Amino acid sequence: MRILTVQKYGIPLTLVLIVMMSLVNSSHAQSNSGAIIAAEGITLTVDFGNGTIKEYSNLNGSSVLEVTSSVLEVEIRWFGPFAYIKGIEGFLGEGEYGWQYWVNGEFASVAVSHYLLSDNDDVAWVYSTPTQRQQDPSLVPGIIIVSTAGFGFIAIVYIGTSRRIR
């Protein structure tokens, strides 16, 4: 009976834990009090993909959105509380082209309104084209784990259901 309980709930619990861990790691808390403190000494680099690169230093702000919009004209698309930068200085993302950002050399997969900065962070925006698009290799293990767990879950449900039908 104990084995059935582990088989029945093991994979769903594993999936829930994976999702919870990824949510905790996806944003950076600034303080334990819950107050968001503006970071100082931020460097912002913008690569327009056509040879033009602009760099701003010693900026202050709490989020990537706040720092970026403080010095550049940005077109923002909101999805509920989540902001997506559709355009910077008139360069709009369309089709396979678009804006991506990195913080301290790491690709950021968090909405610009939710990525909280720390002092002396380096933010880099790149207008990517299909040939320039960079892949984040740190996503590969997660994709494999989630896919395997999903197929395992489907197999367990299929086997359990087929036994009840007979």
Image (cartoon, rainbow, N blue to C red):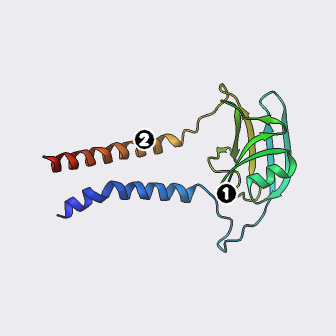
Residue picked out by circle 2: 144
- The quadrant holding residue 66 is bottom right
> At 70% from the left edge and 35% from the top edge, which residue is drawn?
98
Q: Amino acid at mark 1?
A: Pro
On the image, the x and y values in percent for residue 136 come to 58, 39
> At 87% from the left edge and 49% from the top edge, which residue is drawn?
71
Label 1: few (<14), some (14–19) or many (≥20) C-alpha neighbours in 10 Å: few
> At 20% from the left edge and 60% from the top edge, which residue is drawn?
3
Residue picked out by circle 1: 81
- Quadrant containing the N terminus is bottom left
Q: Earlier in the sequence, mark 1 or mark 2?
A: 1
Please tell me whether mark 1 or mark 2 is closer to you in this view.
Answer: 1
| 20 shown above or below 131 | below
Report the residue that reaches farthest toward the front: 165
Q: Amino acid at mark 2?
A: Ile
Report the residue that reaches farthest toward the top: 131
Report the residue that reaches farthest toward the left: 166
Secondary structure of the residue carrying tag 1 is loop
Q: Nearer the viewer, residue 153 or 2?
A: 153
Is residue 140 rendered to the left or right of residue 90? left
Q: Nearer the viewer, residue 86 or 50?
A: 86
Secondary structure of the residue carrying tag 2 is helix
Is residue 22 rendered to the left or right of residue 60? left
On the image, the x and y values in percent for residue 90 come to 83, 36
- The quadrant holding residue 51 is top right
